[in-house]
C-alpha cells in the first residue's frame, strides 16, 4: 500500500498534520496555532536548547505550509532560582544561590541587565542568525503582568487533589503537605527557601516562612522571616510540576516538544492542564538528548556544553539547522567534528532540490527537498549554486595564511575550474573553513573500506609518488595524472573507480578538480601522508 505523503514528506509535516487533526477533533478555534519552546536561563544555552526552539519553529512552518496561521513562542524561565554555579563561571555568584536568575547580575560584565538576560540572549542571538521568527516571553514579566493569576489560584485551591495526583502519577509525596508555589522571601530575596504554609483564597495571598531548603546535595539556609505575598505581585513562581500547564492555558499553546529528562513533569502537567485547568494539553513529541562524542549528556553546569555560537564559528546556520531537522528521534552523539560532513550534506540537499543529483527513492527525495525548504523558511532560492566540498576548502586553507588568504584560496579554486566568480557565500564558506583549519584541524580519517586490489594499487601509487618526489619536473601535474591511470590499469581497476577512490580519500567527495593539479598543489609528501592512513 502506497504511503500517504503529507505536506513536504518530513516528520515536521506529520507532526503538523497530527496537531490539526487533534485540534479539529477537540473542536477548538484554528485561527492561530501557537507552538512553544522553553529558553533556559540558568546556564549557557547549548545545541539541545537551540534544537528545541528550531524544531518547534519547523513545526510552525509546517502548519503554515498546510494553510494555517502559526507562531512560535519562546518562553524564558528567568524566574528559576540559581541552583549552582556552572563550570567556568565566577565564584562570586555563590552569594546569589537560590535567587531568581532575573535578579542576579550578569556574570560576564555589563552587556546585559541580568544573568538571565545574558543566557536567554545568547539563545535568541543564535535563533536570529538562523532566521527563526519567534515571540519572546519572559517568565518574570508573565508573573508580574498577572497573566497566570487565574491558573495559580486554581492550582492553590486544589492543593489536596493535586498533591495526591502527583503522588500517584510519579511517586513524589512532598506536594501532599506543601503548596506547589515558591515565594521570593521579602527579606533575603531567595527562592525555594521560603515555604508556602497557607493559601488565603479570598485575598489571593500566600503565608510563608523562610525556613531553608536542600538544593541538590547542599543545604541552603533560610533567614527565618515570616511573611505573606499576593499571587499577582510576581514575587514567586509555581513549581515545574504545575507551571507548564498554567502557561499552556494562559498562552493558548497547542504544541510543545520535550526531552525525556522531564517526562515526569510533563505527565503531571498534562493532567493538571486537562483536568484541573479544563484546557486540553498541547500535543507533544518526545525527543532524545544530545550527547557529546564520548556519550556524556551535554550539560550547562558540567562544562562540556556545545553552544550554537561555537558551531557557527566554523559552520553555516544551514548546516546547524540540518542537524536539527534531519530527525527528532534517537540519541545523537554530536561535536564540532560533525560540521564538515553537515556542510557538504546541506549542499547535497540543495543539489537534490534543484535536480542536479539523481535520487531514485522518491520518498527520500521528497524528504530532502522538504527539509531544504524548511531550512530556507519556505522561501528557497530560485537556483542553486556551485558547491565546493568543505574538505577541499580545509586543505586549501592549510596551504595559505596571511590577510590575502581568502583571495589565494579563491584563485586556486578558479584554477581548478571549481568556481568562476567570487561571491559572499563562497568567501564566508572559505572563512569558516579557515577558522576550522587554524583551530580544529584533525588528523582523523573518514572510514573507507578497501579491498586487497585497491590497497595494493594504492601502495604501488605511493611508490610512484616517491619517485616523482625526487624529480624536478616542470610537468609534474601531467605525470601524476599519468601515473594514476597507469596504476589503475596495472591492477585492473577501472580508472573511473580509482579516481573516485582517490577523491574520497583526499577530499571526501566522489568527484573534484583534476587530480594531477590538485595533488601537485597539495604536495606529494602531504598526499602520501593522507593515503597511508587508509592502507
Image (cartoon, rainbow, N blue to C red):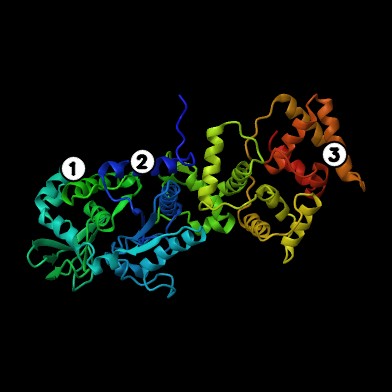
Measure the C-alpha gap from mark 1 to mark 3. 71 Å
Quadrant in which residue 402 is drawn: bottom right
- Give residue 153's position: percent from left, percent from top: 14, 60
Quadrant in which residue 362 is drawn: top right
Question: Could you tell whether 280 is left or right of 406 in the image?
Answer: left
Q: Secondary structure at mark 3?
A: helix
Q: Earlier in the sequence, mark 3 or mark 2?
A: 2
Measure the C-alpha gap from mark 3 to mark 2. 56 Å
Q: Which residue is mark 2?
A: 18
Q: Which residue is mark 1?
A: 171
Q: Which residue is mark 3?
A: 481
Q: Secondary structure at mark 2?
A: helix
- Give residue 329's position: percent from left, percent from top: 42, 39
**Pointer 3 local density, CA inside 10 Å: few below 14, some 14–19, many at least 20:** some
**Pointer 1 local density, CA inside 10 Å: few below 14, some 14–19, many at least 20:** few
Q: Secondary structure at mark 1?
A: loop
Residue 301 visible in the shown view: no
Image marks 2 and 1: residues in contact by CB distance under 8 Å: no
Residue situated in front as seen by the camera: 433 or 258: 258
Residue 109 visible in the shown view: yes
Residue situated in front as seen by the camera: 434 or 146: 146
Question: Could you tell whether 518 is left or right of 258 in the image?
Answer: right
Q: Earlier in the sequence, mark 1 or mark 3?
A: 1
- Give residue 377's position: percent from left, percent from top: 51, 53
Residue 334, placed above or below residue 499: below
Question: From the viewer's perspective, is the residue at label 3 or at label 2 nearer?
Answer: 2
Residue reaching furthest to the bottom: 110
Amino acid at each position: 500500500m502506497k504511503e500517504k505523503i503529507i505536506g513536504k514528506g518530513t516528520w515536521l509535516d506529520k507532526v503538523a498534520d497530527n496537531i490539526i487533526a487533534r485540534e479539529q477533533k477537540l473542536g477548538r478555534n484554528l485561527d492561530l496555532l501557537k507552538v512553544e519552546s522553553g529558553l533556559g536561563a540558568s546556564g549557557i544555552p547549548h545545541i539541545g536548547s537551540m534544537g528545541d526552539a528550531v524544531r518547534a519553529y519547523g513545526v510552525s512552518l509546517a502548519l503554515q505550509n498546510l494553510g494555517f496561521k502559526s507562531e512560535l513562542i519562546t518562553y524564558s524561565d528567568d524566574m528559576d532560582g540559581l541552583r549552582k554555579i556552572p563550570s567556568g563561571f565566577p565564584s562570586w555568584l555563590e552569594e546569589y544561590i537560590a535567587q531568581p536568575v532575573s535578579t542576579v547580575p550578569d556574570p560576564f560584565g555589563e552587556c546585559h541587565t541580568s544573568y538571565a538576560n545574558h543566557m536567554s540572549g545568547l539563545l535568541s542571538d543564535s535563533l536570529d542568525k538562523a532566521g527563526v521568527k519567534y515571540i519572546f516571553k519572559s517568565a518574570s514579566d508573565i508573573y508580574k503582568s498577572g497573566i497566570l493569576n487565574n491558573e495559580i489560584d486554581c492550582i492553590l485551591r486544589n492543593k489536596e487533589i493535586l498533591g495526591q495526583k502527583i503522588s500517584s502519577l510519579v511517586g513524589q509525596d512532598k506536594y501532599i503537605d506543601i503548596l506547589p508555589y515558591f515565594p521570593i522571601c521579602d527579606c533575603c530575596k531567595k527562592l525555594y527557601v521560603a515555604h508556602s504554609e497557607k493559601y488565603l483564597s479570598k485575598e489571593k495571598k500566600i503565608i510563608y516562612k523562610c525556613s531553608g531548603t536542600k538544593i541538590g546535595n547542599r543545604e541552603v539556609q533560610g533567614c527565618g522571616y515570616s511573611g505573606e505575598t499576593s499571587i499577582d505581585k510576581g514575587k514567586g513562581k509555581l513549581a515545574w510540576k504545575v507551571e507548564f500547564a498554567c502557561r499552556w492555558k494562559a498562552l493558548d499553546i497547542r504544541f510543545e516538544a520535550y526531552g525525556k529528562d522531564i517526562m515526569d513533569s510533563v505527565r503531571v502537567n498534562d493532567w493538571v492542564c486537562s483536568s484541573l485547568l479544563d484546557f486540553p494539553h498541547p500535543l507533544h513529541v518526545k525527543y532524545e538528548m544530545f550527547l557529546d562524542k564520548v556519550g556524556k549528556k551535554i550539560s550547562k553546569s558540567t562544562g562540556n556544553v556545545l553552544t550554537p555560537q561555537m558551531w557557527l564559528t566554523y559552520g553555516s546556520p544551514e548546516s546547524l539547522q540540518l542537524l536539527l531537522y534531519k530527525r527528532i528521534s534517537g540519541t545523537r552523539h554530536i561535536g564540532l567534528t560533525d560540521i564538515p560532513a553537515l556542510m557538504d550534506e546541506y549542499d547535497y540537499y540543495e543539489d537534490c532540490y534543484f535536480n542536479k543529483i539523481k535520487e531514485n527513492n522518491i520518498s527520500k527525495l521528497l524528504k530532502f527537498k522538504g527539509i531544504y525548504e524548511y531550512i530556507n523558511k519556505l522561501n528557497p532560492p530560485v537556483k542553486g549554486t556551485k558547491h565546493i566540498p568543505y574538505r577541499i576548502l580545509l586543505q586549501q586553507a592549510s596551504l595559505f595564511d596571511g590577510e590575502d588568504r581568502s583571495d589565494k584560496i579563491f584563485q586556486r579554486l578558479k584554477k581548478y575550474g571549481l568556481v568562476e566568480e567570487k561571491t559572499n557565500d563562497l568567501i564566508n564558506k572559505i572563512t569558516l573553513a579557515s577558522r576550522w583549519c587554524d583551530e580544529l584541524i584533525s588528523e582523523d580519517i573518514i572510514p573507507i573500506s578497501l579491498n586487497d586490489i585497491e590497497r595494493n594499487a594504492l601502495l604501488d601509487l605511493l611508490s610512484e609518488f616517491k619517485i616523482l618526489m625526487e624529480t624536478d619536473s616542470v610537468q609534474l601535474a601531467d605525470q601524476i595524472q599519468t601515473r594514476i591511470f597507469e596504476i589503475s590499469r596495472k591492477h585492473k581497476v577501472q580508472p573511473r573507480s580509482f579516481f573516485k577512490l582517490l577523491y574520497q580519500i583526499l577530499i571526501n567527495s566522489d568527484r573534484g578538480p583534476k587530480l594531477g593539479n590538485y595533488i601537485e598543489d597539495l604536495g606529494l609528501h602531504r598526499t602520501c601522508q593522507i593515503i597511508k592512513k587508509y592502507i
